[in-house]
Image (cartoon, helix red, strand yellow):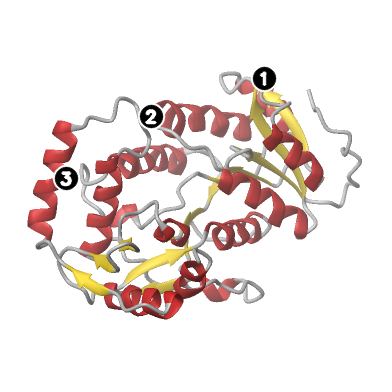
Amino acid sequence: MATSASSAFNSATPVVVLAGATGGLGRRIAYHLRQRGAAVRALVRQGSGTKPEAEELRQLGAEVHEVNYGSVAEMAQVCAGARCVVSALSGLREVIVEAQRLLLLAAVEAGVPRFIPSDFCIDYTKLPGGSNRNLDLRREFGQRLDQAPIRATSVLNGMFTDLLTGQAPVILFGPRRVLYWGNPDQPMDFTTLDDTAAFTAAAALDADTPRYLRVAGEVATTRDLQAAATAATGQPFKLLRPGGLGAFGAVIKLTRALAPSHGEVFPAWQGMQYMHNMLSGLPKLEPLDNHRYPEIRFTSVREVLATRQ
């Protein structure tokens, strides 16, 4: 089943099983696990073992296992002897709820003591149901996870700072504006993909983690984003406020009605829901656990924006 030659890890080496390992976050988690001396068993879908992303994992020294995500027995075989199963899977219900459910069953069947689900988001436990489709799915799976005979730890990191360089329409580089709704002084949490991966790798090898770990590379308000963009580019940025959060909610409903997702994981309105949640202040991460792994140096918003030049 393994498609890597690097399988000769000694028995003292901690083993971590990583699902969703070929994604951007997954590959980073694999890298940081290997940097910490862990043996990584990367689960990839059948037929994906020859893709460039799988070869990158092999170059890191990870084992690559092609598995049928619908087979609990097959995944349990790969999970045998692991200290932790980490999920970096991305998708909608069939992935976040159903595929993770089977992965969880496999971990339990194999006797794995710990499970880290694919949360990596704002604190959805503080949000009302229906305010964010993707986070509702994570809440639903989290309820199943809490009922399973396994120790669970969710890593919550706010928004990926990397998105501010263009994918998230917050910092508008052309007109040099920072778009926001509501209060420009509302604190929000931002963490880069790589810092989130480093923190997750440390948590996977830490036997005493609590149910939730909250991390923020930087806590920043909209005004802080404005200052960071100005400093990073050397050009003055101004604030742009179309309206309050109520108006923003109406825009989200209209956008969702006019542009349904058609199965997309991140349609435009989903990103808008996420920003609405953050700007509301409800899912603010408190208290932060940044100090838990003091060796990790977190990347600031300004540093990330400077890479866009």
Dot label at residue 30: none
SS category of the residue bearing label 1: loop
Residue 170, located in which quarter of the rendered image? Answer: bottom left
Instruction: Please state which amino acid type lies under the numbered disc 3.
Output: Ile
Which residue is drawn at the image coordinates 52% and 37% (left, top)? 89
Instruction: Please state which amino acid type lies under the numbered disc 2.
Output: Arg
Report how far apart the C-alphas of labels 1 and 3 lie in the structure.
38 Å
Q: Earlier in the sequence, mark 2 or mark 1?
A: 1
Residue carrying label 1: 47
Task: Please say if the residues under marks 2 and 1 sit with CB atoms less than 8 Å apart.
Answer: no
Residue 58 image position (x, y, % from top left)? 79, 39
Residue 44 image position (x, y, % from top left)? 65, 30
Q: Residues within 10 Å of mark 2 (few under 14, many from 20)?
A: some
Report how far apart the C-alphas of labels 3 and 2 lie in the structure.
21 Å
SS category of the residue bearing label 3: helix
Which residue is drawn at the image coordinates 52% and 53% (left, top)? 153
Dot label at residue 252: 3
Report how far apart the C-alphas of labels 2 and 1 lie in the structure.
22 Å
Instruction: Please state which amino acid type lies under the numbered disc 1.
Output: Gly
**Does 5 sit left or right of 296 as displayed?**
right
Which residue is drawn at the image coordinates 45% and 62% (left, top)? 161
Q: Residues within 10 Å of mark 1 (few under 14, many from 20)?
A: few
Residue 57, located in which quarter of the rendered image? Answer: top right
Which residue is drawn at the image coordinates 65% and 56% (left, top)? 201
**Does 186 sit left or right of 189 as displayed?**
left
Residue 225 image position (x, y, % from top left)? 34, 73
Dot label at residue 93: 2
Q: Residues within 10 Å of mark 3 (few under 14, many from 20)?
A: some
SS category of the residue bearing label 2: helix
